[in-house]
Image (cartoon, rainbow, N blue to C red):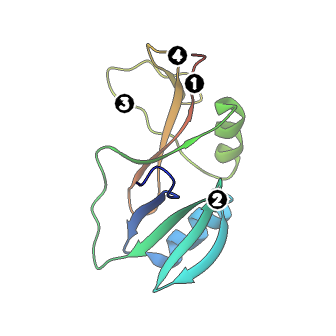
Amino acid sequence: MLSDARLQTLILTDRIDEAERFYRDRLGLELREKSDGALVFDVGGGDLRVSPVPQTNPSEHTVAGFAVDDVDATVAALGSRGIVFERFDGFTHEDSGVLTTPYGARVAWFRDPDGNLLSVVQFGAA
């Protein structure tokens, strides 16, 4: 039933103007439209809807991830735009912030202005 639907990812913000600059200018996403007060960005043909709410709290876990072909190049490009990558205790991160999982995926995490935890990931060969 839903397997043919286009997935829409929702992220909440209480800083809509800051969020717009972050997702558009720092992450390089195309702002497709503003709808009912929300920002709708194109991500690989799907929608990332950044919706305003009265208050948010930083997330403890990843709320959205971007699968990329080259995590090193993506991390370098985002870093040049001022993105700071998270490091988690108990894990061995490369100098860039990238972590290689036991299954071969390479991932790095960062936060948006509301503290939402986002990731970029390059999956290992199957």
User: Taking 103 as reference, is 126 left or right?
Assistant: right
Q: Position of residue 52 (x, y in %)?
A: 39, 77
- Decide which of 81, 51 is in the foreground and name it: 51
Q: Which of marks 1 and 4 is in front?
A: 4
Q: Name the residue under label 2.
A: 26
Comparing 71 with 2, the one in front is: 2
Cα distance between the residues tagged 2 and 1: 21 Å
Q: How far apart are marks 3 and 4 (CA)?
A: 18 Å
Of the residues shown, which amino acid type is indicated by label 1?
A: Asp
Pointer 3 residue:
88
Residue 95 circle label: 1
Query: Label 2 amino acid?
Result: Arg
**Nearer the N terminus, badge 2 or badge 3?**
2
**Nearer the N terminus, badge 1 or badge 4?**
1
Give the percent coordinates (x, y) of residue 12: 37, 67
Residue most toward the front?
1
Counting residues from the start of the chain, the first of labels 3 and 4 encountered is: 3
> Mark 3 falls on what kind of element?
loop
Quarter assignment of residue 67 = top right
Is there CB contact under 8 Å for labels 1 and 3? no
Q: Name the residue under label 4.
A: 104
Q: Is mark 2 on a helix, strand or loop?
A: helix
- Local packing at callout 2 (Cα closer than 10 Å; few below 14, some 14-19, many 20+) is some
Quadrant of the frame with the N terminus: bottom left
Amino acid residing under circle 4: Gly
Residue that sits furthest to the top in the current view: 102
